[in-house]
Each structure stands twice: as structure tokens, then as C-alpha cells.
Amino acid sequence: MAKANLVSKKVRMGHRDIIKYQLLTYCFMNDIQLSKNELDCLTLLGALGKHELASFCNTAVEEKIFKTAQTVRNFLTKAGNKSLVYKEGDNKKKICLNDKLNIQTQGNIVLDFKIFYVTQK
């Protein structure tokens, strides 16, 4: 049987931090590049849950993630094209993180990743 070096860590995180960690992991595994502000914007959306688009844009500006609501809208369009965000409705659009990301945002959250590398000998 092959020997492996095992690293096991237990870390307590805040609500937004654990959402951000899941988003970082998803983007890393799917080779999606995001800036810090874009990542913070998605983290905010995950923390707030399904939200009305205009209201969310204003909240992102109030939290100083982006400078204008239009910049937030532009990023959300980009995120929608990458299937990170889901938009629904015609008039007062609602937005949320895409379910396919499988990002846990509610209740108690425990992440159990098993990531490995095997040498070829």
C-alpha cells in the first residue's frame, strides 16, 4: 500500500468567510479567475441569499465592494455568463448564486474536502 502524507485541519470560520472559501474552491477547481472585489460581491450575494437586483447593487456599493451600482450590474452580467449567478424575472429581477455551484450558505456548515495527489511509481 502506498504511503501518503496526510494534512488534517479544523478551522472555525465566520459566515461570510466560509461562503468565500467555498467560492474560492469552486473557482479554483473550474479555472475561473475573479478579482478580490468580484469574489467579495459573490460572497455578499451568498450571505444575503436571493435578492432583488437593484437593491443588491446598492448594498454592494454601500459595503464599498464596487464604486457604482452599474459596476455591480456589469460584474453580475459577467458572473451570469460564467454560470456563477442566476437571474430570474423580467421587471424586478431577482438574483442568487447558481445552485449548480453547491455553495452552502444556510444553517451550520461543515466542509469535508478530500483532495489528493498520487505519484506514479
Image (cartoon, helix red, strand yellow):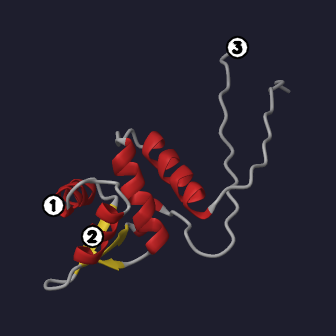
Q: Amino acid at mark 2?
A: Asn
Residue 69 placement (x, y as % from top left): 20, 63
Which label sits in the foreground, 3 or 2? 2
Say what amino acid the circle numbered 1 marks. Gln
Please tell me in which quadrant of the rendered image residue 95 appears: bottom left
Task: State the separation of the CA atoms marked 2 and 1.
Answer: 9 Å
Judge left or right: residue 52 versus residue 36. left
Amino acid type shown at disc 3: Lys
| Viewer can see residue 100 | no
Image height of 112 relative to 100, above or below: above
User: Where is 85 relative to 11, above or below?
Assistant: below
Residue at the image position 51 percent from the left and 53 percent from the top: 20
Which image quarter holds the N terminus? Answer: top right
What residue is shown with label 3?
A: 121
Label 1 near label 2: C-beta < 8 Å?
no
Q: Residues within 10 Å of mark 2 (few under 14, many from 20)?
A: some
Q: Earlier in the sequence, mark 3 or mark 2?
A: 2
Q: In the rendering, at what x and y percent does residue 11 appear?
A: 75, 49
| Residue 87 on image: x %, y % | 25, 73
Mark 3: give few (<14), some (14-19) or many (20+) Cα within 10 Å. Answer: few
Q: Nearer the viewer, residue 3 or 92?
A: 92
Q: Is residue 117 left or right of residue 77?
A: right
CA distance separating discs 3 and 1: 54 Å
Q: How many marks?
A: 3
Q: Quadrant of the C terminus?
A: top right
Q: Secondary structure at mark 2?
A: helix
The residue pinned by badge 1 equals: 70
| Residue 90 in sight from this viewpoint | yes
Residue annotated with mark 2: 58
